[in-house]
């Protein structure tokens, strides 16, 4: 019996963020008590070599679900091949006022306007150090909402320096729609400056720590072909290690008239699937295998994951699909990808 299929109708009776917080706390408690050892064996998948890292399977947890790295061991028990935590900022911040998380149930979508709510990078590091998990861990970094855009690079540098020793790879999030003007960092001049600065810092940190930690860039689905080409060219020029496509969308044409569709924030889940896949396809054509793509956005089945890989992704991540389909989705994707 799929436990999640029994629990989800009850969870869906409550406010989305209340259910979200309850689920994370329950998962953390279950991991601490050892209950998750009863969970089915991890899915059997072919390992993938990406960015010089061996991923035991190609299915990852996307950033945003475990912002503070507080539930790493609980998530690991669900069979993920890798886990990405964050987005984390240099200083703690509360995020946007509640309510800020909404289910668009008719479309299996979610709207969030969290605004990088997190307890700060120092808290995240303490949680990572306390976790028993020794698998592939991505740490997703961002800027504080009140840091002026002209100083945004400084926030990324602060986070990068602090998380470097603890991460398998570091994701630079410049694509959340919920931090004012953040997506302006995707524009050519600003992005080139950011990538050049981070690449230089990566070289220094690799020497200091005696290990090379790859950097990936997470981009939005709301980009024109020309912008995608510019970003791809800059990623290659600055020798960035990978790209995550995509974050949430501001578009609403696919959910018009549905409950909560008009809430401000980023839309994820099934409605973003096609946009995300198109960006992956366009990136792949431009990159020509020069760097790997992690595909995320609207994966709610094994077939959706196969579609992302066919478009050019090397690995996939899920978030909204986990909420609508439960942990069984990890196993379903693994079976589909082989």
Image (cartoon, rainbow, N blue to C red):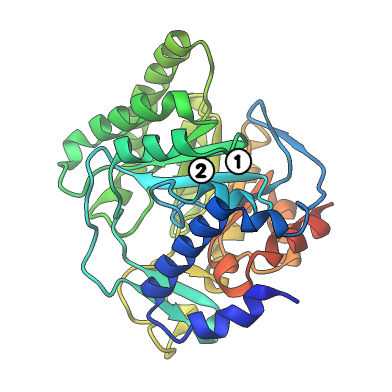
Residue in the image at 56% along x and 35% along y: 242
Say whether residue 53 is left or right of residue 20. Answer: right
| Label 2: element kind | helix
Counting from the top left corner in percent of width and height, residue 216 is at: 50, 36
Counting from the top left corner in percent of width and height, residue 88 is at: 34, 44
Residue in the image at 65% along x and 69% along y: 300
| Label 1: element kind | helix
Counting from the top left corner in percent of width and height, residue 133 is at: 58, 39
Q: Quadrant of the N terminus?
A: bottom right
Marks 1 and 2 close (CB-CB < 8 Å) = yes
* For residue 50, above or below residue 330: above
| Crowd class of label 2 (few under 14; some 14 to 19; many from 20; radius 10 Å) | some
Q: Quadrant of residue 334?
A: bottom right
Residue farthest to the front, as pictured: 33
Q: Is residue 171 visible?
A: no
Q: Is residue 28 visible?
A: yes
* For residue 158, above or below residue 303: above
* For residue 55, above or below residue 28: above
The label shown at residue 286 is 1
Say whether residue 50 is left or right of residue 116. Answer: right
Q: Circle 2 is placed at which residue position?
A: 229
Distance, label 1 to label 2, CA atoms, is: 6 Å
Q: Quadrant of residue 7?
A: bottom right
Counting from the top left corner in percent of width and height, residue 198 is at: 38, 25
The label shown at residue 262 is none
Closer to the N terminus: mark 1 or mark 2?
2
Residue in the image at 38% along x and 23% along y: 196
């Amino acid at each position: 019996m799929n436990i999640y299929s029994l629990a989800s109708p009850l969870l869906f009776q409550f406010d989305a963020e209340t259910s979200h917080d309850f689920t994370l706390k329950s998962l953390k408690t279950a991991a601490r008590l050892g209950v998750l050892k009863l969970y089915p064996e991890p899915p059997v998948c072919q390992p993938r070599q990406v960015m010089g890292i061996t991923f035991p399977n190609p299915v990852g947890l996307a950033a945003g679900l475990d912002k503070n790295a507080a539930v790493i061991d609980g998530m690991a028990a669900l069979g993920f091949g890798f886990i990405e935590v964050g987005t984390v900022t240099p200083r703690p911040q509360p995020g946007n006022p509640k309510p800020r998380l909404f289910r668009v149930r008719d479309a299996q979508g979610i709207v969030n306007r969290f605004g990088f709510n997190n307890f700060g990078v120092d808290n995240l590091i303490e949680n990572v150090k306390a976790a028993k998990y020794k698998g592939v861990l991505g740490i997703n970094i961002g800027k504080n909402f009140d840091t002026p855009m002209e100083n945004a690079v400084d926030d990324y540098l602060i986070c990068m320096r602090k998380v470097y020793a603890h991460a398998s790879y570091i994701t630079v999030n410049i694509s959340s729609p919920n931090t004012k003007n953040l997506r302006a960092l995707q524009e050519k001049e600003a992005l080139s400056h950011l990538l050049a600065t981070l690449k230089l810092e990566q070289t220094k940190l690799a020497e200091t720590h005696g290990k090379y930690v790859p950097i990936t860039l997470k981009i939005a689905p709301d980009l024109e072909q020309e912008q995608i080409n510019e970003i791809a060219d800059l990623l290659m020029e600055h020798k960035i290690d990978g790209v995550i496509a995509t974050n949430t969308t501001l578009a609403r044409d696919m959910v018009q008239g549905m409950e909560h569709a008009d809430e401000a924030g980023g839309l994820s889940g099934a409605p973003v699937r096609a946009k995300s896949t198109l960006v992956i396809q366009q990136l792949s054509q431009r990159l020509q295998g020069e760097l790997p793509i992690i595909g995320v956005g609207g994966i709610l089945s094994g077939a959706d994951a196969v579609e992302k890989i066919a478009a050019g992704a090397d690995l996939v991540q899920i978030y909204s699909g986990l909420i609508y389909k439960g942990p069984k989705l990890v196993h379903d994707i693994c079976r589909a990808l082989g």
